[in-house]
Amino acid sequence: MSFLHREFFALFFVLCFLVLPGQTLSAAEKQSPNILFLFTDDQRADTIHALGNPLIKTPNLDELVHSGFVFNNAYCLGSNSGAVCVCSRNMLLSGRTYFRWTGRYASAEKPNFPDSMKAAGYYTYHHGKKGNTAAEIHKRFDHSKYLNDSQARLLGQPGKEIVDNAIEFLQKKDDQPFFMYLAFACPHDPRVADQEYMDLYQREEIPLPPNYLPLHPFNNGEQVVRDELLAGFPRSKAEIRKHLHDYYADITGLDRHIGRLLKALKDRGEYDNTIIIFSSDHGLAVGSHGLMGKQSLYEHSMKAPLIFSGPGIPHGQSDALVYLYDIFPTVCEMVGTDIPQGLDAVSMWPVIEGKRTHIRETLFTAYKDVQRSVRDDRWKLITYPQINKSQLFDLQNDPQEMKDLSGQSACQPHSDRLWMALKDWQKKTGDTSPLVSKTPQDADFKAPTSEELEKLKQDWQPKQKKTKQQPSHKKQ
């Protein structure tokens, strides 16, 4: 029987309490798997070679795919601000939707990921971007340290600082199992990758996204937010290829440093006893649907890669509909510790071990008060309450969401069913935002002129300059 099974861990923790004073648990602790959680920033689900992108070079992530279990439909639930990473990472560490919070951030006084792992006997280690802003929960880690986000993104070696520190930790650690949460600041812009990574791609040969558009066809409520100002209006093919070139090179650079960390685990004999989880906080448009950022509910923006690899993890994949915050209770179940009460998140472990094919029938996403969406295993509804417009997509035949079927009478039953599911999700999550506006805005999107674009950029610029070096907080 695999040591991941609950029965083993129940026995393990009973034995822990039976150890006499002065005796060591190091031999027993070695039986518990380490957990290495790699979490990137703004990485689309389709940016790993082994998951179907023939152009991108990600040999180390490919290794995890080839040995591990992949969730093909892993989503960020959404956000109450343009900084989608804030909500995503707070939901991840709290296991609760952002509708549960009294403010912008999750409370550390309620159940959280690091407390649960410490209760399971793990030394908890966090190193990541300050922009994650789950600061109160970060303080719960035994070791917590922040990057200077802006500086880290400009050094040309994405992820190097975090990996350097993680390798140093591995060289000094004792026998206690570790839960290591590495929250990288890349491939979020500004994307600077050294020439060695840029040279791996020929810009003119980089294909545009299959759903590339010069402009989004209507006003989605968030088209002059900071991310959307990174490219001109309309989005030229040459400009999108430039962004994709930087994006792919950044991911390849990060992959190289992840490879260094995997090698360090192997060199220390820890690799075969380490479960590795790889994911990202959400996706990114980068030209899809005429958009640049993550402030939409299309698949490219809300979906992220999700891979589990390591001892006791079978090789395979699943189309189950899951949230990124489901990782919290999944790890709890994997290592045999109690899943806290009151979570919105659900463990994915029954899917990984092959006992279930899914954990929910539908999946809900939300962005501020301007977009709501729900999907099942085939159909997806997106609604835009500010303009009283909806879209319906058949994801089985149109995975790029290019053909809106909302006006077709034959598809009305699917629309009606998903509308009911959407309302049920609102009740379930505590979302009180109206789905219809009594005074709808103009549905036409009017692209800013070059002068207006420059003014918008200047308005956003001071907000970007506020990033400062943040102190670390450590408990030794």
Image (cartoon, grey):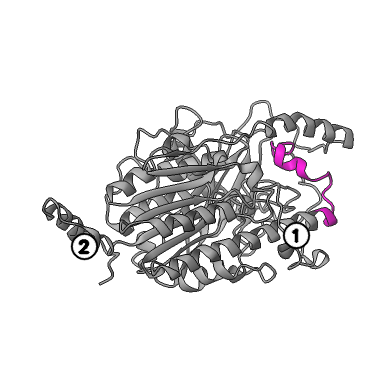
Can residue 316 be spotted in the picture?
yes
- SS class of the residue under badge 2? helix
Give the prevailing secondary structure in the magenta stretch: loop
Q: Which residue: 45% across, 41% down? A: 424
Can residue 39 be spotted in the picture?
no
Could you tell me residue 472's position as x and y percent? 49, 38
234 inside magenta stretch: yes
- Quadrant in which residue 220 is drawn: top right
Between residues 175 and 254, which one lies in front from this camera angle?
Answer: 175
Using residue 204 as the reference point, say whether residue 19 is left or right of it: left
Between residues 119 and 259, which one lies in front from this camera angle?
Answer: 259
Number of other residues with Cα within 10 Å of mark 2, as a class: few under 14, some 14 to 19, many 20 or more = few
Between residues 118 and 332, which one lies in front from this camera angle?
Answer: 118
Quadrant (top left, top right, bottom left, bottom right) of the C terminus: top left
Q: Is residue 41 above or below residue 456?
A: below
- How many numbered markers are drawn? 2
Could you tell me residue 1's position as x and y percent? 25, 72
Q: Is residue 231 above or below residue 468?
A: below
Could you tell me residue 50's position as x and y percent? 58, 71
Q: Residue 81: which disc?
A: none
Q: Residue 245: which disc?
A: 1
Q: Amino acid at mark 1?
A: His
- Quadrant in which residue 79 is drawn: top right
Region rendered in magenta: 220-239
Q: Which residue is mark 2?
A: 7
Q: Amino acid at mark 2?
A: Glu
Using residue 73 as the reference point, say whether residue 107 is left or right of it: left
Number of other residues with Cα within 10 Å of mark 1, as a class: few under 14, some 14 to 19, many 20 or more = many
Q: Nearer the viewer, mark 1 or mark 2?
A: 1
Q: Which residue: 36% across, 60% down? A: 34
Q: Is residue 313 above or below residue 118?
A: below
